[in-house]
Amino acid sequence: MLGWHFVDETLKDGADVPPDGEALTAGGPLQLCERGLHASERVLDALKFAPGDTLCRVECDGVEERQIDKFVCASRTIVWRIDAEEVLRAFARRVALEVSEYWDMPDEVRRYLETGNETLRVAARGAARQASRDAVLADEPQAAAAGEAARAAAARTHAARSTGLAAAWAASKATRREEAWAEFDALLERMVEEARATAPAAGDDDEWGDFADEIEAEFS
């Protein structure tokens, strides 16, 4: 079955992350959270366990125990991977905008969420934090949660995985709808697929390499 899995520069045990297409296997009896290889059926659930911002689409064999947000398997193979840092930050801004109806969003917050302009981020974060605190004092929990989603989206000092997860969690609370998490998961999956489809192929950004080849061909 297919799943999602985030990795850092190495695996959690310090081993190298295998290349795409190479199966990683686990020996012995499998036990969820204890022994075996883990992944999630939903990309947003995989974000809960992310040690880094590299997102892998994985093929898993020998699936045994499952929980609602993860499963354990005997073999896991990376089909493809992307650096999801900017996707996750864009996702955080998108979900914060999705719940804008639940609070009186300050203009500076909206401008940052719509543009991602870094010069607006600090002011947006401060305004969102203050508005969220005011909503708590006014006993307006949905407004407070929506403000927290925006504050999380503007938290550039935190890892992208933390930013994306916090924004989705707060936005889900703001909606008070059980299906919100699944909807945000579908949104993130679409954004990941779009980013993968538009990413340059390996070597496409090596402009000097292309130029050097032209020079060599011209003067050889």
Image (cartoon, grey):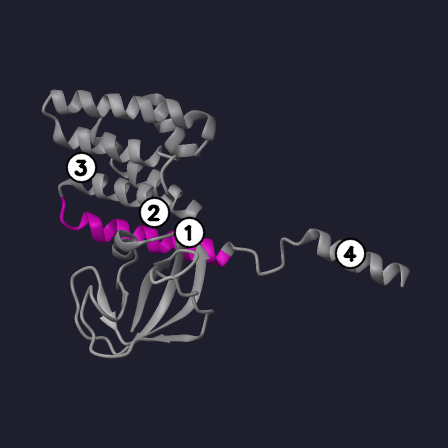
Q: Quadrant of the N terminus?
A: bottom left
Q: Amino acid at mark 4?
A: Ala
Relative side of 16 to 146, left or right: right
Q: Earlier in the sequence, mark 4 or mark 1?
A: 1
Q: CA distance from mark 3 to mark 4?
A: 54 Å
Please tell me whether mark 4 sits on a helix, a strand or a loop: helix
Residue 99 at x, y percent in the picture: 24, 36
Q: Nearer the viewer, residue 72 or 4?
A: 72
Q: Which label is found at residue 84?
A: 1
Crowding at mark 1 (Cα within 10 Å: few <14, some 14-19, many 20+)? many
Distance from the alpha carbon under mark 2 to that under mark 4? 38 Å
Residue 116 position by quadrant:
top left
Q: Which percent across, then down, holds residue 106?
A: 31, 22
Lower position in the chain sequence, tag 2 or tag 4: 2
Give the quadrant of residue 77.
Answer: bottom left
Q: Amino acid at mark 1?
A: Ala
- Residue at image x 30%, y 75%? 26
Residue, disc 3: 174
Q: CA distance from mark 3 to mark 2?
A: 20 Å
Magenta extent? 177-197
* Circle 3 SS class: helix
Is residue 191 magenta-colored? Answer: yes
Marks 2 and 4 in Cβ contact (< 8 Å): no
Disc assigned to residue 212: 4
Q: Which residue is mark 2?
A: 161
Asked whether disc 2 touches disc 1, contact meaning CB atoms under 8 Å apart, the reply is yes
Give the residue type that dot 2 points to: Arg
Q: Are marks 3 and 2 in contact (CB under 8 Å)?
A: no
